[in-house]
Image: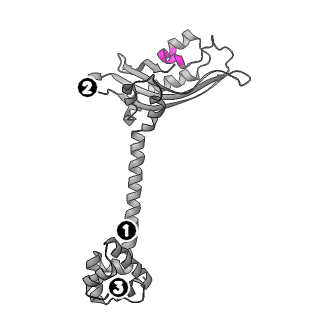
Amino acid sequence: MTNNDFGKTIVQLRKEKGLTQKELADKLNVSDKAVSRWETGKNYPDIETLQRLAVVLEVSVNGLLSGELKLAKKVGKRKKNVIVTLVIFLLLYLFPVWHLIPVTSLDFYSAYDASFLLFRGLPTNRIQVSNIVQTAEAAFSDIESTYDEAKEKYGVLSRYAIPSDDYSGAITENHKLRIWSIILNPSPTAEHRGYMWVYYSSEALDKDGIVVCGSWRVPALWYLDKDDDGEWYVKDIKEGP
C-alpha cells in the first residue's frame, strides 16, 4: 500500500466519522499538520499513533495499512446493491402494479376486478390452471372449426376462436396471450373460485395477408370454477366491448 493510498483511506474514514483534521488530531494528541501529512501521503504515523488511529476510526491496523478495508466495503456495498436489486425485481414480479394502468383507464372494470391484478399469484397456480391455458391457446389458434364446433371444444373460451362459418376467408392467424395474474381460492368463503387476468392480441388474415378480423391489446378477466373432478375451468369472461 502506498503512502497516497494510506492517506486516501484516512480521509475516507475520517469523513465517514464526520471529523475534521483538527478533531481527529485532538483525539490522537497530535497536530492537525501531522494528520494533513498522513492524508497527503507525505508521512506515516508511528506504530503507537497508528494503533490509536485504528481505534478512533474503528478499523483494524492491518485493514488500515493493507487497504483491505476499502475492498471489503466495496464488496459489501456491491453485495448490498445486488440484494436490493433482486428484492426490487422480485417485488415487481409478484406485484405488477403497472398492469392496473390499462384496466383502470376503462370504466368497464370495477375496483374489485382490478384488485386481482395487485398480486401475480403463487407460482403453483399456473400449474393448476395449465389445462385452461392449453385450451385457450388452442381456441386462439383455431380457424377451422365452425361456431358450434368451437363452442363444443372450448366452452366459453370459444369466443377466441375464428369460426370458419363466419370468416371462411381466414387462412392463418396470429395471437399473443399473456397471463397477468392467477388468484385461486382468494378467501375461505370463496373456495373453488378463481380469477385470471389475461392480456391478448389476436388477428386472422386471408390469403393476401389482409386482416379479416382481430382484437388487439385487450385485458380480460376470466372467472374460474372447479368441475366435479376438481379441475379448474373458465366459467365466465368479463371483457370490455
Q: Are marks 2 and 1 in contact (CB under 8 Å)?
A: no
Q: Quadrant of the N terminus?
A: bottom left
Q: Is residue 157 magenta?
A: yes
Disc with the residue nearer the chain's start (2 vs 1): 1
Q: Residue at x 61, y 22 (%)?
A: 214
Splitting the image into 4 quarters, where does residue 189 fall?
Answer: top left
- Image coords of residue 183 (percent x, y): 37, 29
* Camera-nearest residue between 84 and 102: 102
Residue 232 appearing in the image = no
* Camera-nearest residue between 181 and 216: 216
* Camera-nearest residue between 104 and 116: 104
Label 3 vs label 1, nearer the camera = 3
Q: Amino acid at mark 2?
A: Pro
Q: Residue at x 31, y 76 (%)?
A: 19
How far apart are labels 2 and 3 at the CA level?
A: 69 Å
Residue 62 appearing in the image = yes
Residue picked out by circle 1: 73
How far apart are labels 2 and 1 at the CA level?
A: 49 Å
Question: Residue farthest to the right?
Answer: 208
Q: Residue at x 34, y 88 (%)?
A: 34
Residue picked out by circle 3: 35
Q: Which residues, given as a range, are shown in magenta?
A: 153-159
Disc with the residue nearer the chain's start (3 vs 1): 3
Q: Are marks 3 and 1 in contact (CB under 8 Å)?
A: no
Question: Seen in the image, is 164 located left or right of residue 122?
Answer: right
How far apart are labels 3 and 1 at the CA level?
A: 23 Å
Residue picked out by circle 2: 188
